[in-house]
Image (cartoon, coloured by chain):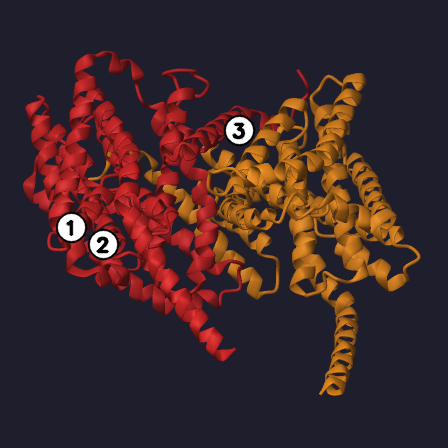
Chain colours: A orange, B red
């Protein structure tokens, strides 16, 4: 054995675990990208592969859990940074209706499916909550990759996904409080009220406060002042959120939204933040995969439950959001409905919190994980089919513009 | 107490610690920047302030140690990214002579001062090693802040600082091996040889390999392929370095250098990497400050030792590097000598490793920490005085260029 530096030696095992997690995540992400499937699914499956279920190269640990939690915090902070309060107002009532129906229908359906399956009330509430949240990141990424972020339906989807995210996080807070055993409804209402007050206060006064503070922050002498202020705000509100009674990720998301319209500096900060996010999020995704207990799928009834929950997740989101887009024509309704289907990491977070609280069984956790992965796999191909005509339209419009331009140029010439 | 989410609760204490560390670091960095002193000193003093010595708001922990270690790894990776092998070759023999004399003189002086003070051989070797390494980051930052990175002496300083860094890290590896008790000189030579071979192999073949692989990496389907490949390489070589017998930071530095001239993609990656570095390095600096035992300074003999080591550190670097620049005129010699004085984080790393190995006493550790901070505080004002004329010259040259340009423009007009 070579002579080594003791100060580093104790951390060598952790470095090796981090390298394996990162490399496995990126190799499977590459495979999935090439199969035109979301990278996020590959990174979760990388965790299943290297985790205790299969290869057992890396085991979950307290350190990895914390790194993973900081990873989700940065992920939601980044989503917040892309969510200007104004952008939500612009999309207007339509997005609200789509979001609300897209939350209510899956929640109720999920609740009753779980009860019908024999789950407890808390369990059923968690399954409902897990079916609620559309993954803003995945939806935006798929549409952005197609160059279709500018269509009417894309805007509705993005606006609705953001509202849906907030509603989902609030439902999660309420459900989590509910699961804490002592079902004190007054306290529950208090927590919900406090959570809503915290959210609204930070989202509205916070954004204004940061817009005022922005010039002062930019005048600071430290390097990257906006980035550092953002980091402190992100971690500070994440802690404050926990202290007030909501999830850390709500605090992180609100911190991002507070900064979203502050200044142009935001752009520079966003790049630095996305570096941290890109570094840490794989550990979050791999960590989730590592916690999947594959042996549970030997039980045929769990396979049935997973498939049933997935079908319910797809249909209820499609129907709920499609109904919300009623009046825009059947095609746009279908576009909105299908665009809201991916649950991705948000559904997994809910299941993970439920598991962490011992509020849901391993069977329900495995089924929800399957649903989150399956919806994320199912949606993209359908989005492609339904938006294909849209693409041709945009191209035709573009071509028409070009003709007009060449017209103008030929007149100038 | 409000109802909280259990999954986040266990990490709430860590979030709070991170917020306090980051906020304290940035507040003191701001104060020091306003006092025209290096931010890095403020961040270390923030650790002294909030650590067990004074306020005791945050205590060192295994988690913070690991985060801090990943912080140094990214810091050295970033320095490596800015160090093209070609840039070292360009500065040529002069930088090598400056670096070697700037390493040999402080090392020998540090060794004998420590022996004279009653230190053991291992202790004396560590004190010598701690006096060796100029902080590339701090030197480059001071000169860059003055807009003087383009002068001849600045280039020599940067080139020499890089070589000095590599020599310092190699000396550290040798000294660390030496301190491991069993003084097996063959093994020592083997470790040194392996370290040098690893360094040269990775630096030269690695850079060529990455230049070849770069187009393939860019063609990957995952987002930010170069950044992710860089992360895996950085953490992978950090682990490999430990396994081979050198410090993790050498691996990280070499990983950076391998990528430094690969492609233009490097620039984009550098921004993302600097986000991670900017986030994690404060924890490294604050963590160091937290480990300072202030009570040791109640002993007047330690105060004397700290001052003596600091004087030796300033004079030996100034004389050694100044001699290396012999023939460029006394002023340029002085510029080079003074520019190499700041020891910053590198001197602290050596002392910390020595302390971690139980190779140096608390007294020597405290004195070296004082020296690293003091040299970083002392150098910048002198750099300003010595480079002031240089600035006027550069401005005169610029003004002359402007006159030529206005001449040309008036002729065109």
Q: Is residue B328 left or right of residue B413?
A: left
Quarter of the image containing the N terminus of chain B?
A: top right
| Secondary structure found at label 1 | helix
Residue highlighted by disc 3: B15
Respond whether the residues carrying marks 1 and 2 are from the same subunit.
Answer: yes
- Residue at 21% in and 18% down: B303
Respond whether the residues carrying marks 2 and 3 are from the same subunit.
Answer: yes
Residue highlighted by disc 2: B156
* Residue A172 occupies quadrant: top right
Q: Residues within 10 Å of mark 1 (few under 14, many from 20)?
A: many
**Label ID, residue B98:** 1
Q: Residues within 10 Å of mark 3 (few under 14, many from 20)?
A: many
Answer yes or no: do the residues labelled 1 and 2 have beta carbons within 8 Å? yes
Q: Let me know if residue A365 appears in the view.
A: no
Q: Position of residue B343 (x, y in %)?
A: 25, 37
Residue B113 versus residue B248 in the image, above or below: above
Q: Of circles 2 and 3, which is in front?
A: 2
Q: Is residue A273 left or right of residue A188?
A: left
Disc 1 from disc 2: Cα separation: 8 Å
């Amino acid at each position: 054995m070579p002579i080594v530096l003791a100060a580093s030696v104790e951390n060598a095992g952790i470095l090796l675990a981090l390298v394996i997690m990162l490399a496995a995540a990126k190799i499977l992400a590459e495979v999935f990208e090439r199969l035109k499937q979301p990278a996020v699914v590959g990174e979760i499956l990388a965790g299943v592969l290297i985790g205790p279920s299969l290869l057992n190269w890396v085991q979950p640990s307290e350190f990895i859990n914390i790194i993973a939690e900081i990873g989700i915090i940065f992920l939601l902070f980044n989503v917040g940074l892309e969510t200007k309060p104004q952008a939500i107002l612009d999309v207007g009532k339509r997005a609200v209706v789509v979001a609300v129906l897209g939350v209510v229908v899956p929640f109720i359906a999920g609740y009753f499916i779980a009860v019908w399956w024999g789950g407890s009330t808390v369990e059923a509430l968690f399954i409902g909550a897990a079916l609620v949240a559309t993954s803003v990141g995945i939806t935006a990424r798929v549409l952005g990759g197609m160059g279709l972020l500018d269509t009417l339906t894309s805007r509705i989807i993005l606006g609705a996904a953001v509202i849906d995210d907030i509603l989902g996080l609030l439902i999660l807070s309420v459900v989590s409080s509910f699961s804490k055993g002592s079902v004190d409804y007054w306290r529950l209402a208090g927590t919900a009220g406090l959570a809503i007050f915290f959210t609204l206060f930070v989202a509205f006064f916070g954004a204004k406060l940061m817009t005022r503070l922005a010039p002062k922050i930019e005048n600071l002498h430290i390097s990257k002042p906006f980035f550092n202020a953002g980091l402190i705000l992100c971690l500070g509100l994440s802690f404050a959120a926990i202290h007030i009674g909501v999830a850390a990720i709500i605090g992180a998301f609100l911190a991002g939204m507070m900064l979203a319209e502050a200044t142009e500096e935001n752009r520079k900060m966003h790049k630095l933040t996305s570096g941290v996010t890109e570094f840490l999020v794989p550990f979050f995704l791999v960590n989730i995969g590592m916690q999947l207990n594959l042996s549970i799928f030997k039980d045929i009834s769990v396979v049935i439950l997973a498939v049933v929950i997935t079908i319910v997740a797809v249909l209820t989101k499609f129907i709920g959001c499609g109904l919300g887009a009623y009046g825009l024509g059947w095609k746009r309704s279908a576009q909105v409905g299908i665009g809201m289907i991916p649950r991705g990491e948000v559904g997994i977070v809910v299941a993970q919190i439920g598991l962490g609280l011992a509020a849901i069984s391993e069977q329900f956790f495995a089924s929800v994980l399957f649903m989150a992965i399956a919806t994320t796999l199912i949606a993209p191909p359908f989005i492609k089919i339904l938006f294909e005509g849209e693409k041709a339209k945009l191209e035709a419009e573009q071509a028409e513009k070009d003709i007009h331009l060449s017209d103008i140029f030929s007149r100038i010439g």
